[in-house]
Image (cartoon, rainbow, N blue to C red):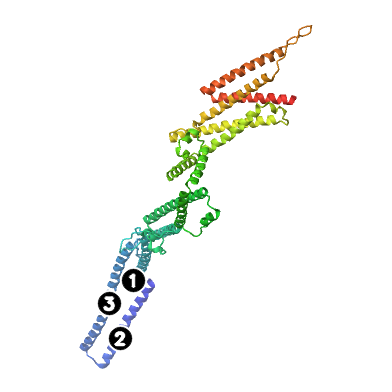
Amino acid sequence: MSRYTRKSEVLASSVISSTNQALATLMDIWDGLGIKEEMRLQRIEEVKKHIEELFNRMIHEEREMKDRIEKSIQFCRKQLKTLCHDLSIDEYKIDENMTILQIERDLRVRLELLAKQKNERLEELKILQQKDQELCSDLCVTPYYIPSGSIPSLVQLEELKEHIKVQTEEKRKRLQVFSTLRAEIRQCLNEMGRQPENSLEQDAICEDEEAFFLTPENIKALTVLKAQLELKKEALLSTLKTVSEKVQSLWELLQVTQEEREACQKISGMSIFEELRMWESELARLDELKMANLKQVILKIREELKDYWDKCFYSPEQRKEFGPYYCDEFTEDLLSQHDEEVVKMKLLYEKCKLILDAVAKWESSWTQFVVLEKKACDPNRFSNRGGTLLKEEKERAKLQKLLSKLEEELKSRIDTWEAEQGRPFLIKGSKFMDYVATQWELLKHQKEREKQDRAQKKEETTPFKTPVKRPGGPCPQVTPSSKSRKLNGTTNSTMSRTNVTHSSASLTTGKVPLATIKEEISKKSSKETIFNSTINENL
């Protein structure tokens, strides 16, 4: 700074020197010309006036320049303050060590830079708001709010970008859901063979995705529409299944040829609605044929009905409750009654299938158990070799355990069923546990009766022997073992008669516990099997 000051001072001194030299030259000229003092003074006054005017003009111009610079500085400061506020940045601070010219230039450059940032932000905001508006219009949501006329901050621009990103992802998800729903709805309509019936269905299958507003309400409406169409489709399929089952049932009843059946079953490329119409047409034809063959059809239905009665373990009394089964006047009304009864029994069987299958398993196991029980009491099996008796005993014990397990499971299931239905579950006219107890009681009674019959036959076939007088000599001593055998024989005979009486009484009264009956049968069968096996081995 001092270097520039010295140069200016030197230059100023040279200006003064040049002025003095010019004045001296003018004095010499005036001396040579002989100009008088008054003229010289006048001329010097003119020179002074020109010099003063020049300096005054320059001073005025420089002062004006200074004023302009100071005003520019004030203007720039004001604009910078406004821009900093609008751009949400800190105010610009001036270095007080700078000159006025440096300050003005620095402020002006800073102002241009912030003005450029302002324009860039406004342009970016315009582009982002356009994207946001399009997305929000498609999704029917509120756009990101930035006050009109304001300059967005960097934070606001970032938040707007994030908002656009979120909405773009949301649109992608909704568009994916819409595309999936549209494809499923279109497929469902095609499978059912029907055209769109309302504006929502038409919009749902429209190819132009932009024509459908991806609002949550519209997506929900499409979901509901798809569910409704699925229900209609399921209803059609259920009806189709019912009709086809009726047709197949009538095929069996009417003994329709295989060629006619295959002609109806060869279906390809048909919608559910068209297929249903075809089966309904076949059903109508078979109904006409059925009416023309009432007796044959009713007899076939009776066979089917009897099969369901057997599966449901109906007693003769329960079967007699359906009187039309025993009617010989084959009319349409009789056919209708048989159809209704078959449907009722079919529903009952399907509803109780698990229980009925378990009962059938118990019946089968019981039949095998009874066969083994009869073998255990058969005297002719003493001739069997190879451990057959022990194998049968193991099989019998295994079946007895299986029967007990099945009875427990069935009792639990039936108790639950009766609690839900509010009525008893009957097997051949009796409650299941009563039926089981009766079977065990009958088995016990049958075994005792067979034992009595064998004892009676043995007494009848044994010839009467005349006592022979023993020769002289000492009387044979009766050993404790022979006496015991005799006593045991008498005791066993007495117990047998007592058991028969008790069995008959218990069968009549039904008060003997089921567990007691099982235990008695098991003990007797085991003893007989072991005893017979021992005899067989000794033989």
Q: In which quarter of the image is residue 21?
A: bottom left
User: For numbered disc 3, what is the local secondary structure?
Assistant: helix
Q: Circle 1 is placed at which residue position?
A: 101
User: Tag 2: Cα neighbours inside 10 Å, few (<14), some, or many (≥20)?
Assistant: few
User: Considering the numbered disc 2 on the image, is that residue within a helix, a strand or a loop?
Assistant: helix
State whether residue 154 appears in this view.
Answer: no
In three-dimensional space, the C-alpha distance between marks 2 and 3, rounded to whole angstroms, equals 26 Å
Quadrant assignment, res 404 = top right
Mark with earlier residue (1, 2): 2
Q: Is residue 12 visible?
A: yes
Mark 1 vs mark 2: give the one in front: 1
Tell me how far mark 3 sits from mark 1, CA to CA. 16 Å
Instruction: Kindly identify which numbered label has been placed on residue 89.
Output: none
Tell me the quarter of the image containing the N terminus: bottom left
Q: Nearer the viewer, mark 2 or mark 3?
A: 3
The amino acid beneath tag 1 is Leu
At a point 53% along the width and 50% down the height, the residue shown is: 255
Image-quadrant location for residue 59: bottom left
> Residue placed at 68% from the left, 14% from the top?
486
Whether pointer 1 and pointer 2 mark residues with C-beta atoms closer than 8 Å, the reply is no
Residue 22 is marked as 2
Label 3, on which residue?
61
Q: Along the line of sight, which residue is nearer the eye, 64 or 380?
A: 380
Q: Which of marks 2 and 3 is nearer the N terminus?
A: 2
Q: Where is residue 267 in the image (x, y as percent from the top left)?
A: 51, 58
For the residue pair 415 and 245, the one nearer the viewer reads as 245
- Mark before the other along the chain sequence, 3 or 1: 3
Tag 1's secondary structure?
Answer: helix
In the image, residue 303 sits, relative to residue 202, either above or below, namely above
Q: In this rendering, is residue 100 above or below 462?
A: below
Hey, what amino acid is under mark 2? Ala
Horizontally, residue 14 falls left or right of residue 336, namely left
